[in-house]
């Protein structure tokens, strides 16, 4: 065992940079890191937040535990006078989906921003202080993100000045609604507004009380329940629910009236288009990007720590079996994941800076502020694309990391299965990633046409936005052959150029073949466009490493290598496009794809001795990781054995069912055997 | 709702072939289908095999349930006088990993084939009749498939004529052992044989009693337990266990002595190398291939049925929202999966025919029977490769199918999460797929060298085996340019040629670059070699469709299209190799990759109206699928709502924890809100 602890110690001896400096960079700055560390210390030492028995709880117990977690968190928040942001950060650290998160992230913002002044003045403080708890009822059993297809109705009754919320069919049952099943007292309901005479005004939002504030019972004519367990045990602690409404009356003022009102007599009044909240949208999406980065960071910390102490197979230089991280098939899988964690965290942080500070969107922001809403569509597309790109990466990377760990990766105590199951819905919710790809592709085609027509006209070249910058590579290439004969895979600028050309050529090819598209072209276009965008941002990080993040030479060096690995691996995954579009040449005798792959290998081998330091820099505590395999001290086997003792099956020597099933079965077998031997 | 049932009925009206004929083909023949159907009817009507409450059981309850399932199955077996094979088939149908399966599939075969005649005569009948239950103790906490690294010792004590089984370290703890935790009474233990004087003879197998046959208590000096839950709730019903031995004595005869004996005085005696069981190995691996095919079949039946009744997004030709299966992003994901289910089932069946009948291995089998054991290594490689290829496909396809279903795919009631979690370990156990890739690559390199030297010598060309047949494409190409200028993607022979060349060229490139290999080359070589092998088999199925399977024209037509889709999609996934090796030309103006993708799209569109029939042909009952989304009658929403009612959280209106946590939280919020409004 001393072997194993010393493996991780030996690995830490090889770190050639300041883990603390990279940690400060990842957390924003040193002060942010200290705040984070102190909060983690506070939570991890509180018995309420112990996770040791979590794997053995039923869903009902997980739900009750979630109530307890929030209850304690609110106590702590009162005690330490947390701001709502600090409270939200603490909630995120609990590493459990909670049946309260959507109150603050979905219900409250919609209610507060779209409710009438009267409604907000009546309920706003209750919402802000969780005196009522809300949920957001959009999805129906038979209908998803296409709000135009929703069936729930809200019919205006001029006689009483009320709306009648109704569920006319089975498929109109509200379904999947987070926190609805057992928790929420109120909700915002998406329903088709029906005016007198049967005029269908399409989907609108209504504020509806669901449960009594006296005793939490469901109000008359509403039926509510939990929709049952989720796949692979994910989101066990959240009461995703269903609701059916049987002609439920609500006051006219409960229509969230920012975008439309109904007068007492039943007239529809539409205010001038209210200004979209540009900063808010960007903030939300950038949070998703950074959050995905931190999830990957967790998974890769666990994986690299375990792969450093796990030994298997051939003898290594020290005579013992080799550390599995030294196998090409392992490091080739793990180190690219590490690079994605860094890139997404920093990319999200760059986006999250206030709009004025977010360099990359500054030109767009200026146009929006000047009253030009045209960039909003493109910004929507790019933020959709980033959501799809990063959530796809998370789901794939967490599972790749788990599998790289061999057998023990399949233990619940590895922690990776739980991370996977809880993050899995991110690829299908809040815009299925395939639907988001369509949106990105549509925006890219539009930008392409605008760019081409500006080239052909005498007008000024339109200012290319951050997400369409790649289009300028079309111009650059007009003079000569597009082929790179000998590509220097070690030059980041070359890689970014290639990825930008690949985006531009893919879009152009799609436009040229618009009448005969194949079945996966939208995925390819969206991927190309998004990867070019991220690659350009990564180049910015690479060039600004020292200045922007206050790093010294050793940290700059390792950070740059990590970013280069990101670019190389992105290029490797784009090889079909790069080859078929003629962006790299085919040469069987000096195959550029082989040179690319060797460059990846060389960079991995260079990063390998630094990998434990690069994961330590995320700054995770053992409490946050909750993984036997990811322990900071490398004592993975002690931890697996210790945690196995807590398994309920081990609390009795003879299992339940022995007397009833197992013993008779064995006795039957012995009788059979005895009777045969007598024959 | 009538809409939905009629969607699936309408889809069935469009079937243009006999579902029954394809069903008979998939099940082997009509008699086999009838036997299968009757067995399913028997089991599905027995209340013991009801699955409706399974999602809500704890692991302990799942284990007890598994005991009950087996207990009832043995009763039925006695009643209907099942053969061991029939019993095993019935066990497989239960759709639950059972803590007894390894007794018959791992423990018994090893014990019976390697135990001494004396040992087998004493215990054989008990083993066969389950009078004792066994497990196979190989893996240790710190050691996996590398048996040379195992630490458990079996030291011979000449004084008493016994072995002493001992666990010297924490890492030597036996771990992950199926059925060990609570069930097994005996086990076969892999341990290092230590002879007097400390001579380490390496790993050997020992038969060890673990629990008392009187009361099932663990025997003295042994500690045993369950290792705890598995990731994502997988294998919940199996008691994978750990064991530690503290100088446990067993008789000398308990060394399984087929390959080595220890005399009373402690001498090591090795018998002449015993003949390997060629048929057995092939049978086991072929079962894995077919089994993976049936798992994919389950997932794709669920997915295609749901995608046929689910409507979303734009309005289709009938004015309602479109069936999601009509979206390119959905059918492009699902139909290739359908093709893999067919290919793997039939490939496994072809391999499973007795060695004399298995056409593809007949030449090898003859050489082995004539005493030439040299083909065994290659056969091992090919069966390893098939295990890796098919298990990788299963895991990927089940999850792809789940995601294609959008939100409801994440419900436990979709059934796909359970299938995924239970099958996940297949990619890391019984040879991690990455390790298997190494073996395939090693065999391929050896075959390449043998082929090349035979070409340069005057000796006869060696007979190419089924798995090295692709090497002959090297010869064919000596004369001309390897490039296909215009490929007919609709010609299966062309596709197979391409995939065989791709295998040969990949191996050759790897050999030429052997001194400077990149980090993923073994995966690429193994993939290339295995895909060429399977493609060649698929071509055989395509050509023999009518003759071999007794199909008529309409079934032949749809079956051939399905097989062509398999080949096309395999080619698409091989595009990087095909392009970089110069096997297809780069032409930006008439891009062959676009033509390939359009061919895939066209074939998908052709197959789309037949897809519900192609899944019906698997013949699954609703009981087997256990999926709300995969119901034969299309009543998916009724089923989701009905099953949600069984969720334990819905058994009370007010959740546990309301009084203790939720009510005080809400009251605090109202107090806060009230006090603010007073300010």
Image (spheres, coloured by chain):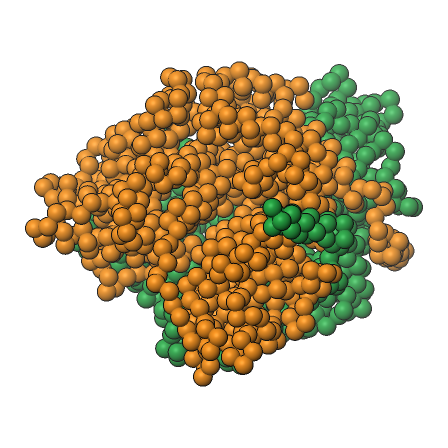
Chain colours: A orange, B green
Q: Give the farthest residue toward the bottom.
A: A197
Q: Is residue A28 above or below residue B344?
A: above
Q: Position of residue B520 (x, y in %)?
A: 41, 36
Q: Quadrant of the C terminus of chain A?
A: bottom right
Q: Nearer the viewer, residue A244 or B34?
A: A244
Q: Quadrant of residue A531?
A: top left
Q: Position of residue B248 (x, y in %)?
A: 83, 30
Q: Position of residue B198 (x, y in %)?
A: 73, 18
Q: Quadrant of the N terminus of chain A?
A: top right
**Residue B24 at least partly seen:** no
Q: Residue at x 68, y 72 (%)?
A: A220
**Residue B646 at least partly seen:** yes
Q: Position of residue B138 (x, y in %)?
A: 68, 36
Q: Is residue B75 above or below residue B179?
A: below
Q: Is residue A598 above or below residue A117?
A: above
Q: Give the farthest residue toward the front.
A: B679
Q: Is residue B87 left or right of residue B209?
A: left
Q: Residue at x 63, y 64 (%)?
A: A210
Q: Is residue B534 above or below residue A623?
A: below
């Amino acid at each position: 065992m001393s072997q194993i602890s010393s493996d991780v110690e030996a690995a830490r001896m090889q770190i050639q940079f300041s883990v603390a400096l990279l940690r400060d960079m990842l957390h924003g700055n040193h002060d942010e890191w200290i705040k984070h560390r102190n909060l983690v210390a506070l939570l991890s030492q509180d018995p309420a937040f112990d996770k040791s028995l979590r794997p053995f709880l039923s869903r009902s117990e997980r739900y009750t535990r979630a109530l307890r977690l929030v209850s304690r968190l609110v106590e702590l928040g009162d005690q330490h006078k947390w701001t709502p942001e600090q409270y939200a950060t603490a909630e995120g650290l609990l590493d459990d989906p909670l049946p309260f998160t959507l109150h603050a992230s979905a219900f409250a913002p919609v209610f507060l921003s779209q409710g009438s002044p009267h409604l907000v003045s009546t309920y706003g403080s209750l919402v802000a202080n969780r005196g009522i708890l809300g949920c957001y009822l959009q999805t129906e059993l038979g209908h998803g993100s296409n709000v135009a297809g929703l069936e729930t109705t809200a019919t205006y009754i001029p006689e009483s000045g009320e709306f009648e919320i109704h569920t006319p069919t089975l498929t109109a049952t509200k379904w999947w609604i987070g926190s609805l099943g057992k928790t929420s007292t109120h909700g915002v309901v998406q329903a088709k507004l029906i005016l007198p005479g049967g005029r269908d005004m399409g989907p609108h939002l209504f504020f509806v009380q669901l449960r009594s504030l006296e005793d939490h019972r469901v109000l008359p004519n509403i039926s509510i329940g939990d929709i049952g367990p989720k796949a692979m045990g994910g989101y066990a602690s959240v009461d995703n629910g269903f609701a059916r409404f049987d002609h439920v009356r609500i006051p006219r003022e409960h229509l969230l009236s920012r975008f439309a009102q109904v007068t007492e007599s039943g007239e529809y009044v539409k205010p001038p288009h209210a200004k979209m909240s540009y900063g808010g949208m960007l903030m939300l999406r950038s949070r998703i990007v950074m959050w995905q980065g931190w999830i990957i960071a967790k998974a890769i910390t666990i994986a690299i720590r375990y792969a450093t102490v796990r030994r298997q197979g051939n003898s290594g230089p020290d005579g013992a079996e080799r550390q599995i991280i030294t196998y090409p098939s392992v490091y080739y899988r793990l180190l690219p994941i590490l690079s994605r964690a860094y890139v997404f965290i920093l990319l999200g942080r760059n986006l999250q800076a206030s709009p004025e500070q977010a360099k990359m969107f500054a030109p767009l922001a200026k146009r929006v502020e000047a009253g030009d809403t045209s960039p909003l569509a493109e910004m929507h597309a790019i933020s959709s694309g980033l959501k799809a790109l990063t959530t796809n990466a998370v789901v794939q990377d967490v599972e790749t990391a788990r599998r790289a760990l061999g057998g023990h990766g399949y233990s619940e105590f590895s922690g990776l299965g739980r991370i996977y199951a809880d993050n899995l819905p991110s690829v299908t919710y809040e815009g299925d990633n395939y639907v988001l790809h369509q949106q990105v592709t549509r925006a890219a085609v539009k930008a392409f046409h605008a760019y081409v027509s500006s080239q052909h006209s005498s007008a000024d070249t339109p200012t290319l936005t951050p997400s369409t910058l790649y289009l300028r590579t079309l111009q650059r290439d007009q003079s000569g052959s597009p082929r790179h004969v000998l590509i220097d895979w070690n030059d980041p600028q070359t890689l970014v150029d290639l990825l930008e050309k690949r985006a531009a050529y893919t879009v152009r090819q799609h436009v040229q073949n618009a009448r005969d598209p194949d079945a996966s072209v939208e995925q390819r276009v969206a991927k190309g466009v998004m990867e070019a965008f991220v690659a350009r941002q990564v180049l910015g990080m690479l060039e600004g490493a020292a200045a922007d993040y206050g790093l010294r030479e050793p940290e700059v060096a390792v950070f740059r290598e990590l970013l280069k690995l990101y670019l190389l691996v992105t290029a490797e995954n784009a090889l079909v496009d790069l080859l078929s579009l003629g962006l790299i040449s085919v040469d069987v005798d000096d195959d550029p794809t082989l040179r690319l792959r060797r460059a990846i290998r060389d960079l991995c081998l260079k990063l390998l001795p630094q990998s434990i330091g690069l994961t330590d820099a995320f700054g995770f505590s053992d409490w946050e990781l909750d993984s036997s395999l990811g322990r900071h001290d490398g004592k993975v086997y002690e931890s697996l054995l210790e945690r196995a003792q807590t398994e309920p099956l081990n609390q009795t020597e003879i299992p339940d069912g022995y007397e009833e099933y197992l013993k008779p079965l064995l006795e039957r077998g012995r009788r059979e055997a005895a009777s045969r031997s007598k024959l």
